[in-house]
Amino acid sequence: MTPDRSKRHRAQAGTTLIELLVSTAIIGGALVLLVGLFSTGAIDSRLAAKYTAAEAATSYEMEKVGAMPYSASPSGYSECFASDGTNPTVVSYQGGCPAAAGLRADVSATQPQDRPQLWTITINSWPAPSRIGSPVSINKGNR
């Protein structure tokens, strides 16, 4: 082999093992970042859906309490909401919900002396009860 030919042969030689390892590490790191972004996006999407459902349940319960006739001895109740759009299920106050339910709204009422009734709505996730957001309170008087 002549010297010119050996230089040309070395210049055209394939990639080295170190180059392959470095490129594999770079691609692997990029894939890990992408998977992390997708999983974070999926979690954020689920949380946003849960908070939206909780806001809808709170609005529903506020409308329901406002439409109820005034009672001198109000009693609390709970309603379970499923994500499939079926009608809410009324259960005993802070009672168990059906398997399909994803949220439980606990509605309690107190009658302070010489003041309007105080209705409080608390939304909990179901089946592992944990409060979603802050409770909402409504004053209701006898008109």
Image (tube, helix red, strand yellow):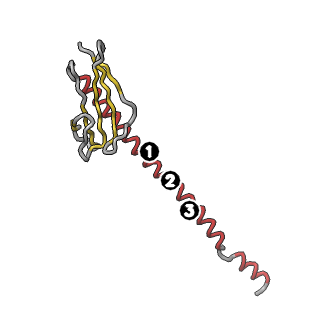
Would you name the residue on which mark 3 appears? Answer: 28
Residue 24: x and y in percent read 59, 66
Q: Quadrant of the N terminus?
A: bottom right
The answer for how far apart the CA atoms under marks 2 and 3 are is 12 Å
Name the N-terminal-most of marks 1 and 2.
2
Relative vertical location of residue 75 with respect to residue 82 in this rendering, above or below:
above
Residue 112 in the figure: left or right of residue 44: left
- Label 2: which secondary element: helix
Query: Is 23 left or right of 103, judged from the image as shown?
Result: right
Query: Residue tagged by mark 1?
Result: 44
Q: Secondary structure at mark 3?
A: helix
From this viewpoint, which residue is outermost toward the bottom?
1
Cα gap from disc 3 to disc 1, whole angstroms: 24 Å
Quadrant of image for the C terminus: top left
Identified at 53% across, 59% down, the residue is 31
Of mark 2 and mark 3, the one earlier in the sequence is: 3
- Which quadrant holds residue 130? top left
Quick one: label 2, few (<14), some, or many (20+) residues within 10 Å?
few
Pointer 2: what residue? 36
First in sequence, mark 3 or 1: give its number: 3
